[in-house]
Each structure stands twice: as structure tokens, then as C-alpha cells.
Image (spheres, grey):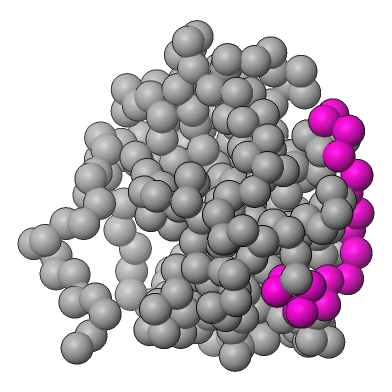
Amino acid sequence: MPLYYPARYNEPIMTPTDKIWRNGHFIPWHDATIHVLSHVVNYGTSVFEGIRCYSTPAGPAIFRLRDHVRRMLDSARVYRMEDLGFTAEELAGAMLELVRVNRMDACYLRPIVLRGYGEMGVNGLKNPLDVYIACWEWGKYLGDEALAQGVDVCVSSWTRIAPNTLPALAKAGANYMNSQLIKMEALANGYSEGIALDAAGYVSEGSGENIFVVRDGRILTPPLGASVLPGITRDSVVRLAADLGIPLAETIVPRELLYIADEVFFSGTAAEITPIRSVDRITVGKGRRGPVTEQMQKEFFAIVQGSKPDRHGWLSYVA
Ligand code: PPE
């Protein structure tokens, strides 16, 4: 039995919004197509972002918009995508405008820079760069119960992209072939998600999330050298821990620390802050969301939903 049946074009599984932004113009959702011989299709030549827009009492607000734009431009630079044709400010403005144009409230934004149609061959430098931004509604990433109940995960048999192979600080489409191996294996074995180890055998991150371990009231998370994406949510957790007076260190995390931790949780734009209740069928702590994770979730959601002051200036209001 396959886990999932392949979707067909006449069975849409995501709800389209009206418009997608392409190279400075709004086009109908269904017109945002590319040629099959585009460089990106053949060689994975894209960098992208995932950004959440939250519903607040003052209207929709995009979370850490400038930080996401900056990371996308950083990713582009790593891959020698030199001139996107738009400044950081223009891209940020386009995202705010897109949420307005689509009359969305809470949604997920996906800006993508890709090398398009032109020449074939590994060198893509002559192919045009196209910039797209889409948005749609995206619910709970690891299931509806995940945020409250926690998820069951495994350590993957796949190693995370190693240093000097695919650069982990760049959020590039091709990195997600590694993520897909991790994720599909986890699902096939009955887990919600897989945690990859880095090339040295230490904990790196989930297929689409950074990871945190709590033991004796201290929070630990793998350093950037452990082949992790420099997560914006990860950085938010680091700052909130400082605000809340919870000690936190970025340090090498041995695999077995996952099993003896009091709490483990994921962070990510899509996953937000998701507790992990077991790893490799070993119960983590009491097997449910722990107090530090809960405190972190409360603080995070209070800020992004506008019920606590935005003391770090993380929200960009759409209106
Ligand atoms: N690591 C990876 C590999 C990753 O993909 C993400 C985000 C993170 C860490 C967390 O980074 P940040 O979102 O900046 O806190 N994964 C995005 C894509 C998920 C997808 O399935 O697509 C996301 O959460 O939007």
C-alpha cells in the first residue's frame, strides 16, 4: 500500500489564491508556470523562503519579513545569483502587497528565485533569474494535534547534507532532496518526522525544522556548523529564551542526548514550535509537551498573534 496516492491535476490538494507575484507583476495563480527545460527543473537551481503571516487584532502581519528577505538574498549570493532585479525593500513590499491583493489574513508566503529557461547544461549563469512570490493558507505542519500533544520522530538513516557539499546556510531547493529522503523514510516507518545527524554523527536538524533539547532547565541547540539552516524561528527561540531568563547554548548535541532529555522540540516557520514526545520510540521526558516548550510556545504565539507587545519589532503589518 503506498502511503500517499499521487495527486492528479484535476484533484487539487491546495487551495489557490488569486494572484502570484512574478518579476514585479501580479499574475493569475494558474498562469505561474515554467518551461520543462528550465534550469531549475533539471538541476534544482532555486533558492526560496517560507514565511508566515499571522492574524492579529491590527490585521495581518508578516513575521520577521526583513530577516527572511535577507536570508533569501544571502542564499542567492552563495549560488552567484547576482542581480535579482529587485532590492530587499522592493521584495518585502511585494510580499505585503501580495497578502493585500489576495485579501488573505493568516497565510504562508513562498518567495522563490529560480534559474529559468535558456541554455541547457550545468552552468546556469546565462539563464534568466525569475522571482516568484506565492501565498496560501497553510495549517499545522506536523498535524493538528502536534502543537499540544507533541510528535513521534526518529533519527534518520540519512545524514544531513555535509559541509562542502550543499551549503546548509543557503535555503536552496536542491537541499530538499536530502530533506525528502529523511521525511519519506520517517513517514514510511510510522513517524511524523525524521531528525538527521550531521556528517560527524551529531544532531543536525529535522527535514524542515531546527531542533532544541532541554535538560536540567537549560536549552541546547546545534550550532550553525552542524549543517543546519539558520532558522528565523530558531533565532526567535534564542532571543525569547534570553528574555525569559532561560539559559541557552548553541553546542554540539550528541544523538543520545535526545533520549535522555527532559524535553525536545522543533522550531520552524511551518512547524512553529512543536514538542517532540518520543525519539526512536524512546519516550522523551514525560512523553508530552514539557514546561519549557510550553512557555516558549506561549511567548511565541502571544507575540506573533499580537496579544503581547512586539518588543523585538518582528511584525510587519500588511495594512
Ligand atoms: N531547517 C530546515 C531544513 C528547514 O527547511 C526549515 C524551514 C527550518 C530549519 C526552520 O527555519 P525557519 O523557518 O527560518 O525557522 N522549513 C520551511 C519549509 C517547510 C516545507 O515543507 O516547505 C518552513 O518551515 O517554512
Where, by quadrant of the figure, is residue 137 drawn?
top left
Task: Name above or below for residue 119 compared with residue 98.
Answer: below
Q: Could you say where residue 225 lies in the image, as x and y percent from the top left?
A: 86, 70
Of 100 and 220, nearer the camera is: 220
Q: Residue at x 19, y 77 (%)?
A: 5
Q: Is 208 or 10 nearer to us in this picture?
A: 208
Judged left or right of residue 73, residue 138 is left
Count of marks overlaid on the render: 0
Asked if the stretch drawn in magenta spans residue 135, the answer is no
Can you name the residue that lies furthest to the front here? 286
Place of residue 18 in the rendered image (x, y in percent of width and height, measured from the top left): 25, 35
Residue 257 is covered by the magenta coloring: yes
Q: Position of residue 232 (x, y in %)?
A: 70, 45
Q: Is residue 101 left or right of residue 146?
A: left
Q: Which residues are magenta?
A: 243-259
Residue depicted at 69% across the width and 13% down the height: 309
Q: For the N terminus, which image quadrant? A: bottom left
For image coordinates 78% across by 34% down, the residue present is 240
Residue 306 position within the rendered picture, expressed as x and y whole percent measured from the top left: 57, 17
For residue 297, side relative to residue 115 (left or right): right
Decide which of 227, 33 is in the foreground and name it: 227
Residue farthest to the left? 10
Residue 32 seen in the current view: yes
Residue 34 falls in image quadrant:
bottom left
Say if residue 126 shows up in the picture.
Answer: no
Image quadrant where residue 266 sits = bottom right
Q: Is residue 209 above or below residue 51?
A: below
